Image: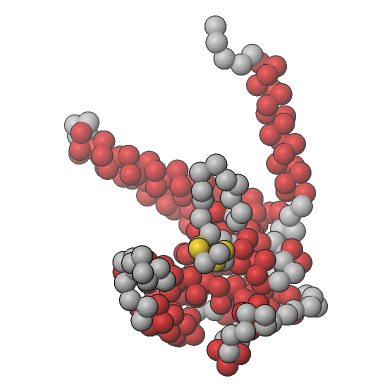
Amino acid sequence: MTGYDADEIKKRKDEWRKRMAAQYASYRYKTLRGLVSGYYEMQENRIAMENRFRVLKEVADFNPALVKKQEDYFKLLRKEETKRAKDIEDAIKDIPIYRDYLEGIHGLGPVLSGCLIAYLQDPKRFDTVSALHRYCGVSSIGGQPQKKHMGNHVDYNPKLKTLMFKIGTSFLKAKNEKYRKIYDEAHAKYEARGKWSESNPTGNKNKLHLMFRSLKSVERIFLQHLWVTWREMEGLPISEPYIFGPGGHDKSHYVKP
């Protein structure tokens, strides 16, 4: 008979519990982190099941009654997700950075705000806004965006990189005037570079590439605003972004929180 014996299984479970305990011991908002993890796990599983079912109902000869039964089940899962989202909202309502700042940003709802706080936890972790950018996966390193490379260690938090994309697109959908203006200005700047070629390596490969790099500008500036505001609220020192210091960019382009 193959497989692990009972003692080996118990040992691995105990090791996993110890890792989780050590991980959560470092969190400032432990309950919030647990709620966010549970929310996204539930959502990812529900989406995966729905996607599989769309194919199965076409190829497995499910009768209408069975299809309806399964669709009703997915509705129940969505309702449960809504309850989990309300739990996240309740957990963050008294956290100062949410109550006094994030809650007032148009297009940034309680779930996105809760996820952001849960993943970042504490502004003390980031001495510079560049460190925050890098952790969130929105930096440019050697002129190239941060991304996964086979065989190399990931130098950012993948969940945060995905979250930042959601936040950026949410601002555009909600027509947030401040961040929409930043997007439009970045879009015009990058569009002026023309189409990518070997002789024009800073050009745009396609419309999607143009959209992503324009959106990245929104994400970076939003994180800059969050970093300054959060650290000021907690009495921590702040510094100007690298691009306006050693980077030598025109300070008239600085967008205040």
- Residue 201 in which image quadrant: bottom left
Give the residue drawn at x 67%, y 66%.
131
Give the residue drawn at x 57%, y 80%.
104
Percent across and percent down for residue 63 are 19, 34
Query: Which residue is more in the foreground, 79 or 58?
Result: 58
Furthest toward the bottom, the residue is: 252
Furthest toward the top, the residue is: 1
Q: Quadrant of the C terminus?
A: bottom right
Left or right, 180 with reference to 85? left
Q: How is the image coloured?
A: secondary structure
Left or right, 43 with reference to 159? left
Residue 164 can be seen, yes or no: no
Percent across and percent down for residue 152 are 57, 45
Give the residue drawn at x 72%, y 66%.
126
Percent across and percent down for residue 157 are 59, 55
Q: Is residue 185 above or below residue 102?
A: below
Q: Is residue 61 above or below residue 9?
A: below
Q: Is residue 250 above or below residue 53?
A: below
Residue 27 can be seen, yes or no: yes
Give the residue drawn at x 42%, y 71%.
202
Left or right, 253 with reference to 174? right
